[in-house]
Image (tube, rainbow, N blue to C red):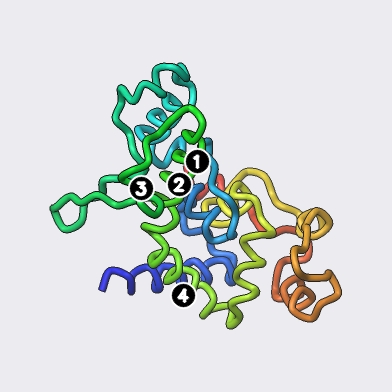
């Protein structure tokens, strides 16, 4: 049932953007990167999970001899909690038997981040994206939309800012991955009802 809320949320955000309604929210950086299909780095999770961020930083910066001594007893596994119980999940095949060393610690951190922020939340992200695509009536356009923006741009659209975003400037600095600017889908996107001058309006009075 909870996944239906993500589908519903995707539709609400899609409608808000389509009708240029600022709803007073900002996106989590990791969630935005997932919707855009971008890689999630260690620095990206700093605000989403400070504890995991600091732990991973310590592992990466730890003295090589110390970590190779296996004093920490780390292996390629992650402990997760589900419905009040905890279980161990392997980050890779036979992960329980692979010790974290100075040579593979970067791989360990990358797999840890991927499991925590990609694999574990894939259903929720997928349902949100589906709801968002329902409003746009095109899943390909949904992916392109998030790829064409920076997180700050999206936050301005949804939360508001004292600064306006120029559509022509946005268009001029957009990079097309797998598309051309002359493709019908791209033309439809830019002609799909955006204000000719700006996307945003000064929302200062509403926030005060």
Q: What element does badge 2 sit on?
A: helix
Identify residue for label 3: 95
Residue in view at x 37 percent, y 41 percent: 98
Q: What element does badge 4 sit on?
A: helix
Q: Residue 111: which numbered mark, if any?
A: 2
Q: Pointer 2: residues within 10 angstroms few (<14), some, or many (20+)?
A: many
**Nearest to N terminus: mark 2 or mark 4:** 2
Residue in view at x 64 percent, y 50 percent: 150
Q: CA distance from mark 2 to mark 3?
A: 11 Å
Is mark 2 in CB contact (under 8 Å) with mark 4?
A: no
Q: Pointer 3: residues within 10 angstroms few (<14), some, or many (20+)?
A: some
| Vertical order, 17 against 59 (above or below) | below
Quarter of the N terminus within the rendering: bottom left
**Nearest to N terminus: mark 4 or mark 1:** 1
Residue in view at x 70 percent, y 74 percent: 193
**Nearest to N terminus: mark 1 or mark 3:** 3
Q: What element does badge 3 sit on?
A: helix
Q: CA distance from mark 2 to mark 4?
A: 28 Å
């Amino acid at each position: 049932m909870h996944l239906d809320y993500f589908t519903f949320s995707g539709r609400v955000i899609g409608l808000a953007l389509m009708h240029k309604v600022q709803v007073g929210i900002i996106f989590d950086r990791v969630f935005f990167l997932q919707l855009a299909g971008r890689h999630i780095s260690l620095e990206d999770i700093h605000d989403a999970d400070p504890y995991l961020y600091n732990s991973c930083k310590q592992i990466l910066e730890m003295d090589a001899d110390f970590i190779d001594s296996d004093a920490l007893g780390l292996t390629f596994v992650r402990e997760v909690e589900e419905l009040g119980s905890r279980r161990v999940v392997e980050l890779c095949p036979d992960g329980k038997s692979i010790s974290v060393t100075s040579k593979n610690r970067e791989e360990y951190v990358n797999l840890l981040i991927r499991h925590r922020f990609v694999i574990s939340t894939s259903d929720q992200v997928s349902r949100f994206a589906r709801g968002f695509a329902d409003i746009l009536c095109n899943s390909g356009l949904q992916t392109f939309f998030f790829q064409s923006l920076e997180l700050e741009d999206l936050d301005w659209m949804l939360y508001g800012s004292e600064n306006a975003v120029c559509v022509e400037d946005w268009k001029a600095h957009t990079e097309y991955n797998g598309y051309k600017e002359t493709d019908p889908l791209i033309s439809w996107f830019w002609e799909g009802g955006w204000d000719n001058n700006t996307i945003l309006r000064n929302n200062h009075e509403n926030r005060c």
